[in-house]
Amino acid sequence: MANSKVSQDTGDLKLDRVSKHYGDFCAVDDLSLIVPDGSFFALLGPSGCGKTTTLRMIAGLEEPSAGTISIGETDITTQKSYRRNVNTVFQNYALFPHLTIFENIAFGLRRRGIKDVKTEVENALNLVEMGHLAERKPNQLSGGQQQRIAVARAIVNRPEVLLLDEPLGALDLKLRRQMQIELKRIQTEVGITFIHVTHDQEEAMTMADTIAVMNQGKIEQMGSATDLYEAPKTAFVANFLGQCNLIKGKITSRSGDKAIVTAKGLNFEVPLSRVATTNDSVFLGVRPEKLRLDDTGVNSIKNCVVTDRSFVGTSTQYMVRAPWDLELVVFEQNDEGLHDLRVGDTVSLEWDPEHTFALDGAGDINAGADLDDDE
Amino acid sequence: MAFLHAVSSGTSATKSVLKSKSLTPYLLLAPGLIWLVTFFIIPIFSLASTSTMVRPDGAQVGVYEQKLRFANYVDAFVANQDQYLRSFFYAALATLLALAIAYPLAYAIAFKSGKYRNILLVMVIAPFFTSFLLRTIAWTQILADSGPVVSTIQLLPFIDDLFRINNTSTAVVIGLAYNFLPFMTLPLYASLERIDPRTLEAAGDLYANGLTTFRKVTLPLSMPGVVAGTLLTFIPAAGDYVNAAILGNPSTKMIGNVIESRFFAVVDYPTAAALSFTLMATILILVTLYIRKSGTDELV
């Protein structure tokens, strides 16, 4: 039977020291990664960071220059894509324009010689709530509908791993939100390992159990959305996920469970567990919503000036200039404690040590900023 | 008054804009229409009327009068049915041969040529820079009895020394396939080039190996090109007489040769006209059936 040729192993997907070179260009650089069976995993990074190349190597559409890829105990590094029990939802869906929706979804089943194609296809169509469109052709469907069909066409094969290559990139914002929830629901229902490649940090945070942030062919940091957001380990991650205030400083003491970072003569406390480097030169980080417009806290900067404010519904965003050449972003929730400051007002900023983190100060303080929504 | 005047001149201006707008399509159509009427519609009616004419007893060669003799068609067909059948047979063989050569060629140019794509396309079209006749005559050299092709084939053990290609039906079919190859290649290329390579990757991702991907995705998606290419090859090949005249022998005559000699050698206009119409009608019917059968209108 044809389907006996397709590998049927279950288990974690493992990338071991995988590299991909195109001539002199290194798209993926010595990348190691374990994706637990059944998890929703996101590869997040700006365009050109190597995330799509990584995905294509897992799919078998590219062969790694070095390293091995395995599912469970089986090495699939050089296995042809049509022998892998891995399916892909392509960026522009890549539906077969000459086949009906039914036949598009049945394609993989027929190739593997599955008996009950009709039931399987109908189940898949129902899963994505597109049962009524079975006899249409792809070009008669809207972008969102095609997207669901592309998911159904891949998922109907019950792959070990489902790869999603920027699957929501072509949809408008509202539809994208809706599909994010939908994809999450489908993943929970079928329990297949999903690997989702995206440059959209919000998308990754909404859906994935684990996010690997990629930059220049390497993984910068891997963890849950909360880990990455609350305790980034590099300036790139801090800037790429949400907004972040980074202040250049020096660790002047490490004692007990806390470190003191000095910047422009001011001392700031950081828990040692939130210091991501052994270097003394650091970037002190704090998220905009953790800053308070007050001067009673342990970490504070006085004599700041409001340079810009914008009201965005749930919060008011201020740009505040510290007494030296540093702009900080502050989000203030729109509730009773609202300060309602104007441009030019003098304020003090304060925040808690447990919301502070310290990153290696060797790199670029702006790494990863302004990269997230440029596509 | 001034106000009224302004208003009325305004509407007349709008009117003249509308008028010129509605004329534009006709003006654009005019050159083509005039051309078609002068060089196609009028000649076809004149040909139709010629086809039922009869040469009066004792009249000079080339003088005919209209008798509405439709039996001309039957006579012409009965006398030349071998050449008809041969024409369609040769044209079909040449079309298949051209398809077999052009498909891999177009596929390679569309998917595998990289930066050489444009050079290869120019090479496909390049033969058009020399005359059709010269190119066909060149084939008599290539296929000559002492030429490279024949002498190479004669090296094979079971081929005797009398083996030849020139002036055989093989040479005619080769010539037809060669001459119409670009008409096959270009539509095939156009339809293959339009295929999103990601759909081919998707097929591989969905457990189809190379051959299955070709059968289930590439070939069906290139069907518009196959249909267009085979029509553009078959239709002119069926009516061609140059290849049969230069590369063939008297027993490989195609219907084009008969029509040509009836018009210019025998000066039997009614028979030539009747043969032309029968050829046209047959091709039209074959093409209609072919398009219906291949169902290309359902393709994107």
Image: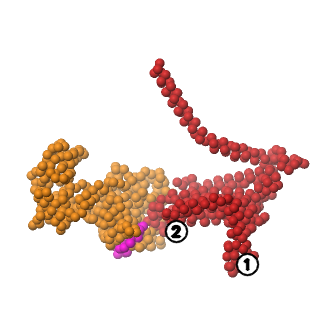
Q: State which chain disc 2 sits on.
A: B
Horizontal arrangement in the rendering, residue A177 relative to residue B246 (left or right) = left
Q: Is residue A312 visible?
A: yes
Horizontal arrangement in the rendering, residue A336 relative to residue A196 (left or right) = left
Q: Name the residue at 38% across, 72% down.
A: A65
Q: Colour of chain B?
A: red
Q: Name the residue at 63% across, 42% down.
A: B31
**Pointer 1 residue:** B160
Residue A256 rendering spot, x and y as whole percentages: 9, 67
Task: Write down the quadrant of residue A69 in the picture.
Answer: bottom left
Q: Name the residue at 34% across, 71% down.
A: A18
Q: State the mark number for residue B211.
A: 2
- Residue A61 colored in magenta in the image: yes
Residue A85 rendering spot, x and y as whole percentages: 40, 69
Q: Are marks 2 and 1 in contact (CB under 8 Å)?
A: no
Please tell me whether mark 2 or mark 1 is closer to you in this view. Answer: 1
Q: Colour of chain A?
A: orange
Numbered range of the magenta stretch: A59-76
